[in-house]
Image (cartoon, rainbow, N blue to C red):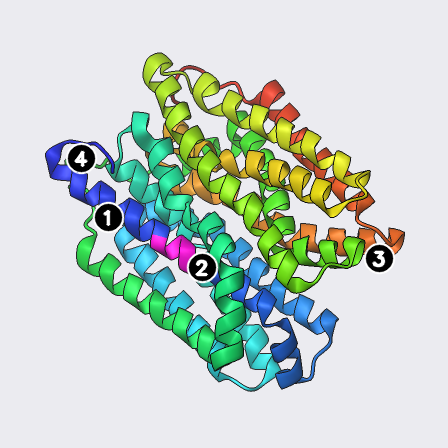
Amino acid sequence: MIKRHSANTGMANIVVGLAFALGLVNYLDRVVISYAVGPIQKDFGIDNASFGLAMSLFAAGALAVNGLSGILLDRYGARRIWTLGLIVWSLAMFALGWIHYWGLFLGFRVILGLGEGVNFPAMNRAISDWVPQEQATRATALALLGVPGALLIGGPLFSSLIETFGWRETFMALGLAGFVIFTLWWSLYREPSQEVRSAPPSWTEYRAVLKDPTLLATSWSFFGFGAILFFGVTWIPGYFEHAFDLKLGTIGWFTTMPWALSIVGMVFVGAFSDRIFLKTGDVRKSRIHVIWILQLLAAVAFIPLALVTSSEWAIFWLTLGIGFSMSANGPYYSICTDLFPQSAGAATGVIVTFFSASGIAIPFLVGWLTDATTSFDAAFLMLAGVVGSGALGLVLFARPAGGTSE
């Protein structure tokens, strides 16, 4: 899968394989809770606003730990810190299926977010440690395929499981899957030797990470990336129900198209970005240009959604918009490892903090705009504006001096 010196090939493949499995399980959690809205509301006797609070508290938990986990990963390594995150996530997921008191459910949603907030910084720290720089984007793209993969298969899978076994049992099964991944990670993964890995970064180096204009521009663009992803996860079924009065069965098939294109795009763009880097050694040409072009195309694709009158054209433009945006996933993470190889965890923590913030802001803003205007048109234009501003920021401010900043 990942070419490397013989002593490291196996470890690189372990990182990619387990990161893929964990991303799949984590995002299956996001899918299952969207399909379990009705049963959860019935069990706890809650309304839509209370359920929305549970969604926001999860994102708040992830946001709270993103930056801190990056620093801890740089200092103590992915094996210990990611293991801790996996244990917390798995316990919280299992508990969510077991408890019967709404206040506790909300508390464990926060804890679930705290556990999951470690994952992407840990993945990038491990990839930085074991995967050659010129292959990092392809490796990251393969590891991240679990995200669109979960969204592709989650609907058909969980609609059947929840109906057959119940939402509680499905939650517990995902928690057990997390424990399996934790066991494999602790058993198989090893940190690089001290001869290979440098000393942890100083606080001065961390301050340089926070002030780096390329990383800040990348972070705002990653907020826009998150805006499209969280819209897709949260609002696509509601959009087609509201705008076109479609049945859930039809919507389920429609929603597979954007994620299928995302999988293809992530694999192709990851390899393409690494190929450019191998030839040029230039982060701006191989990563930044790739991202802003794809995000600009995504922003443009969302504009016609404010004008379409048929579900066929709507899914066409949604598929392009989500597909273009998701295809850039790998290069975002590679910017962190390219520019800050010793502070990759902290740098990734910065951009993922912006990503988590979009998970809090965007679902609420879309809901507020649709309530205020009685349609999704304003929400689509808002998304186009946010994503487009991220692309413009990369063009103007993401100008790394040479190949690395460290």
Mark 1–mark 4 Cα distance, whole angstroms, equals 18 Å
Q: Nearer the viewer, residue 135 or 60?
A: 135
**Residue at 32% in and 34% down:** 342
Residue farthest toward the right in the current orientation of the protein: 373
Mark 3–mark 1 Cα distance, whole angstroms, equals 46 Å
Left or right: residue 6 compared with residue 370? left
Label 1: state its secondary structure: helix
Mark 4–mark 3 Cα distance, whole angstroms, equals 55 Å
* Position of residue 364 measured from the top left corner of the image (x, y, whole percent): 72, 56
Which residue carries the number 3 mark?
Answer: 371
Mark 2–mark 4 Cα distance, whole angstroms, equals 31 Å
User: For the magenta stretch, what is the residue range?
Assistant: 21-25
Does residue 331 appear anywhere in the picture?
Answer: yes
Where is 384 relative to 168, above or below?
above
Amino acid at circle 2:
Asn
* Position of residue 73 measured from the top left corner of the image (x, y, whole percent): 34, 48
Label 3 packing within 10 angstroms: few (<14), some (14-19), many (20+)? few
Amino acid at circle 3:
Asp
- Residue 26 bears which disc, if any? 2
Q: Quadrant of residue 183?
A: bottom left
Label 4 packing within 10 angstroms: few (<14), some (14-19), many (20+)? few
**Residue at 84% in and 51% down:** 375
Mark 2–mark 3 Cα distance, whole angstroms, equals 30 Å
Q: Nearer the viewer, residue 210 or 316?
A: 316
Query: In which quadrant is the N terminus drawn?
Result: top left
Q: Specify which label sits upstream in the sequence, 1 or 4.
A: 1
Which residue carries the number 4 mark?
Answer: 196
Q: Specify which label sits upstream in the sequence, 2 or 3.
A: 2
